[in-house]
Every structure is written in structure tokens, then in C-alpha cells.
Image (cartoon, rainbow, N blue to C red):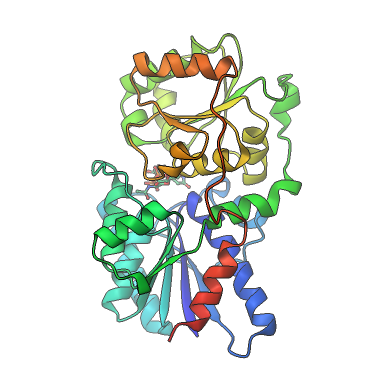
């Protein structure tokens, strides 16, 4: 069997890592080996957004880097498609595995499908219902041409059923991002800023913001940062900044006394920080899954989520970006009065093994 595994942006790396490891494990004992190419589209290219994750998560070096870099949605999509098309012609894989919902996911799935290569979507079937987010379009387009869905939740299974996809194409496998989490819990690294700022366990918050709707307009960014800074009861908020957010933050030229601003953190450092935090404030999707498994309170500064099980079962609350909504949740978080959650079904660290077993049995 010959397959391509696609990774492009930071949240892809912790999802593909376990799949590569599971393939290697499979190949040790299987009669029919799985051959694969790991293809990095180059959507994320900074060392701290990409290479550091490969190193820490022991992901093999990509066989190919398409080197697309930054650009508009259309520029990135177009470049990825052109370059991946050539790569397909050169090797003729039978299956293309895409993960998550980034531009690379969508661009490679379209290209593969048009070249007659079957598409497997890991984390297929999830929906936020918010079509103003590029990720939602990526999910919709990718799923519309996916041959095999590997899903993280029963809600995703339901969504796919409602969209008319047959049960025999949908495999409820669990969450490969959580495979990475469990595999690395004993290897976490305390970042130097922890002691430098005399942080104490369960006495600081962690915040991440990178959604265009929160960070691309100076006013909304300033508004959110001031609101958090002024309402954390003097506690420190560790804020590892995404490059997109930093661009706008630098233009703001403001200082916030309670925000400990730092660059993007490595995986092992970031998980250390959220695991030991009193709570997390984020507009990410994946982080709400990690906090759910770690049992850490999480506030999502968005109006919707494509991962509703993090709210119904986990520790996540969708609080939007309106101060009237944020403040009561922040108060509860600081008082330690947060709901207790449970871990969703099959988020058990063994998802990639299940996926590879299924893939090895496909025609
Ligand atoms: C992408 C994903 C988003 C994911 C996020 C995680 C899409 C549509 N969005 O958003 O779902 O949550 O990654 O980080 O795919 N930049 C750098 N260095 C890098 C990468 C990006 O400086 O290594 C800067 C560039 O100026 C770029 C900007 O960040 O223009 C945004 O990067 P881009 O890849 O377009 O999307 P993200 O906002 O990172």
C-alpha cells in the first residue's frame, strides 16, 4: 500500500505524528507493509511553528516540503494544489490522508481526488456552523469528496449521516491529537518563564488567540486584551503569541501588566503550561480538547465550536467575545467554581493504531 500523509500547519503535526508511529509499528509485524510519504505543504514554516514540533514529537522528517509559505487563502490553496499535483504524478499513491481543517487539508484533498487518489479525512465530520471561518469551508469541501472518514465523536458521525454519507465509509476512531497528549505526558518541559516569573501551579492562566475575527482588527484585539488584563484579580496570564496575533499586537504598542507575553511555545512546554494552569482562555479548537482530557477549565472566546463534546462532556464553555458574557465566566474560573468534565469516548491514546489497522484492511 502506498499512501501520502499531509501536514501543513501547527495543529496538524500532533495529529499526524501518532499515525506515522502506528504505521511503523504495523510494518514491524505485517506481511503487507504500508509505504508512505510524509508531505509538508510549508503553510507553517517558522521553526517554532513547525520544525520544533517534528523534533519533540519524534515525527519523521517530511519526504517532501511543498514550500508554499504565507499568502491569501486563494494563494495558499492554489500553490499547494499545483505543487501537490506534481508530487502525486511522480509517485502515484493509492490513498491521501489529510487531517483537521486547515487550508492544506482542503487543497490536498481536492488535488488527490481529481488525480484519482482516494481521500481519508482524519477528524472528518465536525462542523461549527460558522461559515465565516475559513476552517469551516475547509471542512465542508474536504468532507464532500472524502472516501473514508475517521471521526472523533458521535456528533461527527451524526453530521455525516445527515449529510448522506454511508456508514461503511465512516469509522469512529477517536482523537489522534489526544494520542500525542497521552504519549508525552511524562516528557513535559517546564518553560524557563515559569520560575522566572515565580508562577505557581493552579495560580496562573494561559491564553491563546489567533482567529482573524479576534486578532486581525486592532480594536477587537485591544478590547479583548484590556478586558482580560483588567479582570484577572492580579493573576498572571501567560500568552504565547501566534505570529498573526503578534503582527497586530506590535502595532497596538500597548503594555498589559498582567499579560506575560511570549513567542509560540514548543509542544512539551505548552502542554506543561496548560496542565498546571488554573484555567485556559482560547479561541482555538484543538486546545479545548486537550484541556478536556487534562480536566483544566477552559473558556472559548468564540461564538461556536465544531467540538461540542468539549462543552457537553468536557471542561469547555463557549463564552463569545462580549464582555457581559466573558466576565461572569472569568469570575467563576478565578474562584475555582468550574464544572468538572469527563473524557469523550475513544479519546484513549490508541486512535492512530485503530486508524492504521482499518487502512491496512482497505482494498
Ligand atoms: C492556520 C489555520 C488555523 C489553525 C492555525 C494554527 C487555516 C485556514 N487556518 O491559521 O485553522 O488554527 O493555523 O496556527 O489553515 N506565519 C508566520 N510563520 C509561520 C506561519 C504563519 O509568520 O510559520 C504568519 C504569516 O504572516 C501568515 C499568518 O501567520 O500570514 C497566518 O498564517 P496562515 O497559515 O495563513 O494561517 P493561521 O492564522 O496560522
Q: Nearer the viewer, residue 318 or 162?
A: 162
Q: Is any part of residue 296 visible from this angle? A: yes
How far from the left and from the top, in percent, is residue 30? 64, 85
x, y (%) of residue 363? Answer: 43, 87
Residue 13 in the image: state x and y as whole percent: 53, 56
The quadrant of the rendered image in which ligand 1 is seen is top left
Is residue 101 visible in this depiction of the protein? no
Residue 99, compared with residue 340, is above or below; it is below
Say which of 210 and 174 sits in front. 174
Where 300 falls versus 324 (above or below)? below
Give how far across and how far down residue 205 sits, in percent: 59, 24
Q: Tell me which corner region of the image, top left, top right, bottom left or bottom right, holds residue 246.
A: top left
Q: Give the vertical position of 199 relative to 137 (above or below).
A: above
Return the residue nearer the eye: 20 or 275.
275
Residue closer to the observer: 113 or 243: 113
Question: Residue 167, located in which quarter of the rendered image?
Answer: bottom left
Q: Which of the 4 image quadrants contains residue 138?
A: bottom left
Image point (48%, 9%), residue name: 230
In this image, 108 relative to 15: left or right?
left
Amino acid at each position: 500500500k502506498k499512501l501520502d500523509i499531509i501536514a501543513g500547519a501547527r495543529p496538524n503535526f500532533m495529529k499526524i505524528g501518532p499515525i506515522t508511529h502506528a504505521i511503523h509499528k504495523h510494518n514491524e509485524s505485517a506481511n503487507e507493509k504500508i509505504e508512505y510519504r510524509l508531505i509538508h505543504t510549508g503553510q507553517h514554516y517558522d521553526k517554532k511553528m513547525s520544525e520544533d514540533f517534528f523534533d519533540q514529537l519524534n515525527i519523521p522528517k517530511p519526504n517532501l516540503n511543498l514550500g508554499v509559505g504565507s499568502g491569501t487563502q486563494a494563494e495558499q490553496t492554489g500553490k499547494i494544489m499545483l505543487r501537490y499535483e506534481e508530487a502525486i504524478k511522480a509517485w502515484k499513491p493509492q490513498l491521501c490522508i489529510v487531517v483537521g481543517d486547515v487550508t492544506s487539508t482542503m487543497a490536498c484533498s481536492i488535488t488527490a481526488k481529481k488525480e484519482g487518489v482516494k481521500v481519508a479525512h482524519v477528524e472528518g465530520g465536525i462542523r461549527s456552523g460558522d461559515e465565516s471561518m475559513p476552517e469551516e469551508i475547509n471542512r465542508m469541501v474536504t468532507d464532500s469528496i472524502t472516501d473514508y472518514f475517521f471521526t472523533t465523536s458521535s456528533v461527527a458521525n451524526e453530521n455525516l449521516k445527515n449529510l448522506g454519507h454511508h456508514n461503511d465509509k465512516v469509522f469512529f476512531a477517536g482523537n489522534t491529537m489526544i494520542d500525542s497528549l497521552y504519549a508525552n505526558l511524562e516528557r513535559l518541559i517546564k518553560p524557563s518563564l515559569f520560575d522566572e516569573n515565580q508562577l505557581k501551579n493552579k495560580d496562573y492562566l494561559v491564553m491563546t488567540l489567533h482567529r482573524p475575527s479576534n486578532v486581525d482588527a486592532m480594536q477587537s484585539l485591544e478590547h479583548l486584551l484590556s478586558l482580560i488584563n483588567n479582570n484577572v484579580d492580579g493573576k498572571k496570564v501567560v500568552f504565547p503569541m501566534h505570529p498573526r496575533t503578534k503582527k497586530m499586537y506590535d502595532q497596538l504598542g500597548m503594555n498589559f501588566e498582567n499579560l506575560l507575553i511570549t513567542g509560540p511555545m514548543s509542544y512539551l512546554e505548552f502542554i506543561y503550561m496548560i496542565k498546571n494552569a488554573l484555567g485556559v482562555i482560547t479561541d482555538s479548537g484543538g486546545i479545548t480538547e486537550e484541556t478536556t482530557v487534562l480536566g483544566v477549565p477552559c473558556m472559548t472566546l468564540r461564538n461556536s465550536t465544531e467540538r461540542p463534546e468539549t462543552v457537553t462532556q468536557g471542561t469547555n464553555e463557549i463564552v463569545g467575545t462580549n464582555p457581559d458574557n466573558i466576565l461572569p465566566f472569568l469570575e467563576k474560573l478565578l474562584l475555582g467554581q468550574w464544572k468538572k468534565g469527563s473524557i469523550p469516548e475513544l479519546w484513549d491514546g490508541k486512535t492512530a493504531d485503530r486508524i492504521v489497522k482499518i487502512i491496512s484492511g482497505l482494498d
